[in-house]
């Protein structure tokens, strides 16, 4: 595999390229997509836009970059793109059936998913309807610089701001993956007593925003009374639900509060909840957010050092916003953990993955996921 700056394509030598996974920032424009498709007609060329930068072996950079699969890697990829629909689970199911037909009955090691933010849970369900609940699905939701909806996913000459792209990876070797948060649980916990999708109305029968504000010592500030977006105020304090316990250690799925609804003091998140969900306030630190990718790699490989062909990293854009000054350090830390293998990473507005020991892939926030190609 090889990582390339797409705008400097003329200066790169590739060994029989087979596919291009691309991540880019909005200011990179779209002309490079036409150029790449024209130069490599018929190859899978796909990807999603990223928040404030792309994670590369040389650091966190603006622009358009690609992870290129070459013939010697022996990794085949098939891709399907679709627009969202009112019945998104059914739409995702049809797309997954199309993907299944493209791989001609082969069993993929994993699926990479990139979607516009909004209802990622339904897409995961649609994929599971076709490939089974145990299929490892990793990915991140498309992002832009300011949450204004300029994000895109694309495959070939087709791009959508309200759609999804899924890619099935069928390698000769193995793909190792992991999905984790890197936040620690606090002493505060409660039960969701009323929820409507991604809006939590009450925790322990009290307005959700009031409870969260008490747990965090007043993190919501004026928004508790006035309502409004609280992304920055809450990025170091998501809520977690236990996905699995491994040797007694809880693995948490994280959810990021992003808005207070003033009329009811409800709290809106970037992932959905159900009544009866038990939640814990989580706490993060800059150090943990810098080094958590190392833990993801260690868990994915069961602490063994392996020679990798390459890797895909998904890293939450909300965490980038909290530690953007340290993102070059994140890239360097990850590069060291994979022994210098080529990698490309997206800063996403939602993350998907299969956690260590978990039975199915899930959608969360403020998390990271890794795909490691052996």
Image (cartoon, rainbow, N blue to C red):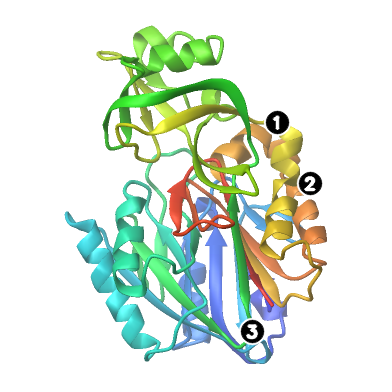
Mark number, residue 285: 1
Q: Can residue 221 be seen in the rendering of this structure?
A: yes
Which quarter of the rendered picture does the C terminus lie within? bottom right
Secondary structure at numbered mark 1 = loop
Q: Is residue 308 above or below residue 230?
A: below
The quarter of the picture where the N terminus appears is bottom right
Local packing at callout 1 (Cα closer than 10 Å; few below 14, some 14-19, many 20+) is some
Q: Is residue 314 visible?
A: no
Q: Earlier in the sequence, mark 3 or mark 2?
A: 3
Query: Which tag is nearer the camera, tag 2 or tag 1?
Result: 1
| Mark 2 vs mark 1, CA separation in Å | 14 Å
Distance (Cα) linking label 3 and label 2:
30 Å
Q: From the viewer's perspective, is 131 left or right of 337?
A: left
- Rendering coords of residue 316 (x, y %): 56, 45
Residue 11 relative to residue 66: left or right: right
Position in image of residue 264 (x %, y %) = 26, 14
In the image shown, does 93 or 66 lie closer to the viewer? 93
Query: From the viewer's perspective, is the residue at label 3 or at label 2 nearer?
Result: 3
What number is the disc on residue 344?
A: none
Tell me if mark 3 has few (under 14), some (14-19) or many (20+) residues whose alpha carbon lies within 10 angstroms of its own.
few
* Residue in front for this viewpoint, 68 or 177: 177
Is the residue marked by circle 2 packed among few (<14), some (14-19), or many (20+) residues within 10 Å?
some
Give the SS element for disc 2.
Answer: helix
The answer to whether marks 2 and 1 mark residues whose Cβ atoms lie closer than 8 Å is no
Q: SS class of the residue under badge 3? A: loop
């Amino acid at each position: 595999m090889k990582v390339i700056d797409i705008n400097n394509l003329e200066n790169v030598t590739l060994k029989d390229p087979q596919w291009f996974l691309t991540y880019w920032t909005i200011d990179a424009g779209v002309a490079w997509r036409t150029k790449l498709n024209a130069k490599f007609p018929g190859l899978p060329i796909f990807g999603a836009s990223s928040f404030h930068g792309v994670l590369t072996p040389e650091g966190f950079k603006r622009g358009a970059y690609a992870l290129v699969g070459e013939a010697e890697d022996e990794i085949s990829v098939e891709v399907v793109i679709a627009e969202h629909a009112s019945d998104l689970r059914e739409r995702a199911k049809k797309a997954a059936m199309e993907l299944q037909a493209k791989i001609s009955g082969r069993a993929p090691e994993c699926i990479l998913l990139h979607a516009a933010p909004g209802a990622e849970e339904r897409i995961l369900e649609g994929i599971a309807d076709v490939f089974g609940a145990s299929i490892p699905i990793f990915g991140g939701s498309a992002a832009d610089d300011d949450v204004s909806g300029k994000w895109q996913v694309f495959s070939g000459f087709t791009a959508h701001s309200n759609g999804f792209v899924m890619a099935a990876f069928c390698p000769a070797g193995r793909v190792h993956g992991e999905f984790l948060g890197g936040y620690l649980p606090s002493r505060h916990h409660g039960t969701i007593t009323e929820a409507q999708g991604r809006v939590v109305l009450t925790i322990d029968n009290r307005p959700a925003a009031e409870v969260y504000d008490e747990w965090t010592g007043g993190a919501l500030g004026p928004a508790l009374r006035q309502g409004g977006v609280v992304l920055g105020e809450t990025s170091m304090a998501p809520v977690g639900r236990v996905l699995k316990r491994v040797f007694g250690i809880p693995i948490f799925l994280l959810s990021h509060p992003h808005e207070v609804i003033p009329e009811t003091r409800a709290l809106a998140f970037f992932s959905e909840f159900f009544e009866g969900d038990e939640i814990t306030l989580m706490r993060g630190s800059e150090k943990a957010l810098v080094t958590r990718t190392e833990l993801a790699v260690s868990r994915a490989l069961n602490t063994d050092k392996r020679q990798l062909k390459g890797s895909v990293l998904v890293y939450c854009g909300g965490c980038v916003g909290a530690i953007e000054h340290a993102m070059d350090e994140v890239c360097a830390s990850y590069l060291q953990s994979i022994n210098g293998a080529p990698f490309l990473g997206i800063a996403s507005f939602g993350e998907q993955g299969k956690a260590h020991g978990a039975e199915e892939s899930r959608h969360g926030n403020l998390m990271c996921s890794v795909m490691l190609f052996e």
